[in-house]
Image (spheres, rainbow, N blue to C red):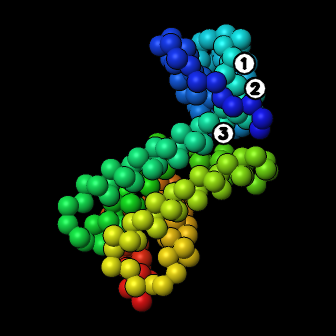
């Protein structure tokens, strides 16, 4: 991707760009990335096609910006969750991370499905997703430093914890027949048994 997304400076331009992102996220979630085009995005946003092209080269740039938004929000939720813990309790840290991840999965319900599909079919989106995942994994590695972590390889542990928590949160949000509270507690028990060995 050669073009960098233009950053609006005036209030109206900022609002228009936000409308574009929300409309695109809605359509990508409802119709899928491949079944959505830029004309539909601007129609849903209620703005002109010229405004779309003032900010984006194509729908892929919009999609990639939503991935970045997703990562920023995920990071913000993780930071808020971890900063809310006032004791030195590993269980509380893990629960905060799982609940923050579940909140993101709920907010981006449906869009995550498109992201999963697109990272297997588009190299730019795959690379963007990998960069963002590495960033989140680095945050989890920082969390391991706060915990009483005994495993020697924090890089592998942070990667495994990311995979577990991300997959767990995605699936728990999509499974209405599971006891969420009990499932979260079992997940924490499993992670603690791993981190204490």
Secondary structure state at the residue bearing disc 1: helix
Instruction: Indicate whether 108 appears above or below 10.
Output: below
Mark 3 → mark 2, Cα distance in angstroms: 12 Å
Residue 96 appears in the picture as rendered: yes
Q: CA distance from mark 2 to mark 1?
A: 6 Å
Q: Are marks 2 and 1 in contact (CB under 8 Å)?
A: yes
Residue situated in front as seen by the camera: 89 or 105: 89
Q: Position of residue 155 (x, y in %)?
A: 54, 73
- Rendered image: mark on residue 64: 3
Q: CA distance from mark 3 to mark 1?
A: 15 Å
- Vertical position of residue 61 compared to residue 172: above or below: above
The residue under label 2 is 57
Give the residue displayed 54% in from the left and 56% down from the top.
Answer: 135
- Residue behind mark 1: 53
Label 2: state its secondary structure: loop
Instruction: Find residue 174 and report its horizontal and vertical position in percent.
Output: 51, 54
């Amino acid at each position: 991707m050669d073009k960098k997304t233009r950053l609006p400076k005036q209030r109206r331009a900022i609002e228009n760009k936000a409308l574009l992102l929300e409309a695109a996220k809605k359509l990508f979630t409802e119709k899928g990335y491949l079944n959505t085009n830029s004309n539909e995005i601007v129609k849903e946003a209620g703005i002109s096609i010229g405004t779309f092209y003032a900010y984006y080269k194509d729908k892929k740039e919009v999609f990639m910006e939503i991935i970045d938004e997703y990562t920023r929000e995920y990071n913000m939720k993780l930071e808020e969750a971890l900063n809310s813990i006032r004791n030195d309790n590993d269980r509380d840290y893990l629960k905060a991370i799982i609940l923050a991840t579940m909140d993101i999965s709920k907010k981006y319900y449906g869009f995550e499905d498109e992201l999963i599909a697109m990272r297997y079919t588009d190299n730019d989106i795959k690379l963007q997703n990998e960069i963002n995942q590495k960033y989140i994994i680095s945050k989890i590695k920082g969390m391991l430093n706060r915990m009483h972590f005994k495993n020697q390889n924090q890089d592998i542990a942070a990667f495994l914890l990311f995979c577990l928590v991300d997959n767990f949160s995605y699936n728990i949000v999509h499974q209405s027949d599971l006891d969420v509270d009990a499932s979260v507690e079992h997940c924490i028990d499993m992670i603690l048994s791993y981190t204490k060995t």
